[in-house]
Image: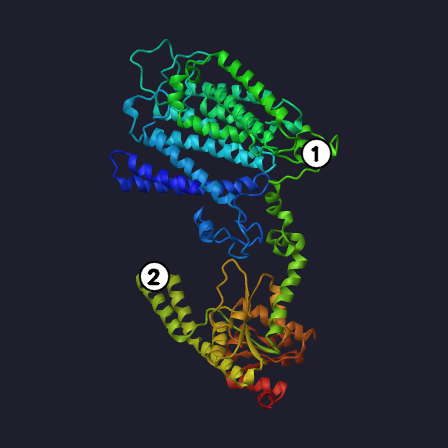
Amino acid sequence: MNFFATVIASLLLARIGYEYVPWWGNLLLALWIWSFGANVGSFMNVVIFRVPAGMSVVYPGSKCPKCLNHIRWYDNIPVLSWLWLRAKCRHCALPISSRYPSIEALVAGIFLILAFVQPVSGGANLPGFEDQYRRGGDVSLWAMYAFHVLLLCVLICAAMIRYDGQRTPRRLYLPALLIGFAAPPLWSLLTLLRSNQPFTWYPLRPVPFHTFAEPDEPAGWMIASWQVEIFNSLLGVVVGLSIAFVLSQLGRIERRRLITAEIPVVVLVGLFLGWQAVCALVVVASIADLIITSVSRASGGRSRVPWIGSLAAATFLFLLFWGPLAEQFPSLSTGATITTFVVATAASVLFTMLATRLSTPNEFGSSTYFAKEKKLAPDSNRNESFMSKPIEGNTHAILNSPSYRLAEDDTDFLKQDALRPVRLQLELLKPEMILEKHGIQSTIIVFGGTQIVERHEAETRLVRAQQRLAEAIDDPQAKRAVDQAQRVLTKSTYYDSAREFSRLISSTCQLNGDCDFVITTGGGPGIMEAANRGAYDVGAKSIGLNITLPQEQTPNPYITPELCFQFHYFALRKMHFLFRAKALVVFPGGFGTLDELFDALTLRQTHRMQAIPIILFGKEYWTRVVDFQFLADEGVIADEHLDLIDFAESPEEAWEIITKFHGDVSRDQQA
């Protein structure tokens, strides 16, 4: 119903919008306002459920209230996604409450309707506007429009939070209070306008921003407009606070229509609309609340509309017809006197007391809710029948509470520091279980640098470096970049060797679907890519063990998808490298390659792992990087430790070292 009503309002705005804008322009404006309002409504849904629970409204993202799966952005488009998915979650197919799109459509409709009656119509709904301001599209009208919809949004959020049986937290009101105090005087200073109202104690205009034409003659002595705005704001706050405080003390706590935590709601109305408006709106809200309570009592049910809900509805209607009402009832404008305040307070007290007597205890809150109001323990002085009554609206808040999530589904819980041992165990078990599931019996580990690429890519990098040098011939860094690119080009043969080595191993050892001697790399580019690519060339499986780093590369595309793993902890990644390893082949590389090499050498030296050959590919490179003989000569390692290392210059030579170490692997595979 809300959706169709807002569509009709959009068409009306297109028909009777700005006179100087074509119909299609007004229609686009209407659709934009409706869409913006629907998005605000979607955010309000988040505020309504998260703010009372003390949760962030930003993180984590939206989740299904039933299965707690994250909702994708295209499933979270206000109203439309709910209709497209037929009110069900895409993941669990359980129904999604119609409350979400209802609030989105309601807020969108309010945005659209108020836009038509206020800025588009030239402020026709506001008291004191001259004809020359109508149909003007003045920036001040849109600013005032934003001012008013902010008030309505806060009122709706507060009403829905009370409907759910929650206390309205202070942080819900704080942004609106700050804007309500700052915006009117700031706007007056920016526009450099003066108030046309004489300074008296109570006949102050109720419009928050200065939009009146200058009078022909000053009416008595006047003060600066920004001072009037501040005085108006303070007076609205004082009057709203006074009335709200009186109403919050009426009746037994469990029957009160307005509780202490909701006093800021009434204060906001006085701050945003003026003291005259808050007097009238509190009376109207009290009458509406009495009628709703009486009807509910007569029908044998319980009222589900909180007092704040009546105030929100009355405020919206008041904004639509503020100007005409002020003309018919001068007490709503500058004709108001102190008598207006007294009569409004007395009438509100009378109607609220009647509603309090007719209301059912615990309509909107739990025993804990009212215990906080009394500042007592939840079980002190509490009637058993009162405590046993269910809180229907609280169910959704419970389902969305972080404490209700299953531990295995709660990523925020699992990421806590105290859960690090659990994360370590999970990271150990997950790859192990998957590798076992796929029947991976043994692996060949290939390490090497990420910068060693195939020849045509190395040539391209060299050309780029030479071009940069040509542009800055005297730049020493550019010269060094050319030298480095030339050296990388000469090492591109290692890329081809790693690829060919992987082809040889994979085609020999993965016959008949066997998973022995499966090529395993760190999953990155360079030599790792070449090794995974060689297995891919012959249709064999290969494994990639990637690591999360601030600037880590994505996995190369040649890894078998179901055998590519992502690690957070380096230690566990290194363990999985060596668990099933039958050989370690290390091509030229940098710090990461050296780290992995020396880890394996240390474990072999101390007999803390199985015996495997450790093959350094490219003796010229490795003897320049590390002088192993020097370490033995200095006595820091034993001579026999040099036997842990073998050197190879070709894929065939490396494969021969492996077969000699483990026996004739190819014969075993064929058998």
Disc 2 packing (10 Å; few <14; some 14–19; many ≥20): few
What residue did someone put label 1 on? 386
Q: Do the residues under discs 1 and 2 have CB atoms within 8 angstroms?
A: no
On the image, the x and y values in percent for residue 405 come to 63, 51
What residue did someone put label 2 on? 474
- Which element carries disc 1, helix, strand or loop? helix
On the image, the x and y values in percent for residue 370 come to 66, 31
Q: Is residue 636 visible?
A: no
Q: Which amino acid lies under the numbered mark 2 shown in the image of this protein?
A: Asp
Q: On the rendered structure, is 620 left or right of 392? A: left
* Front-lying residue, 651 or 81: 81
Q: Which of the 4 image quarters holds residue 477?
A: bottom left
**Which quadrant, please, contains the C terminus?**
bottom right
Residue occupying the point 58% across, 43% down: 55
Residue 165 position (above or below residue 615)? above
On the image, the x and y values in percent for residue 345 come to 54, 17
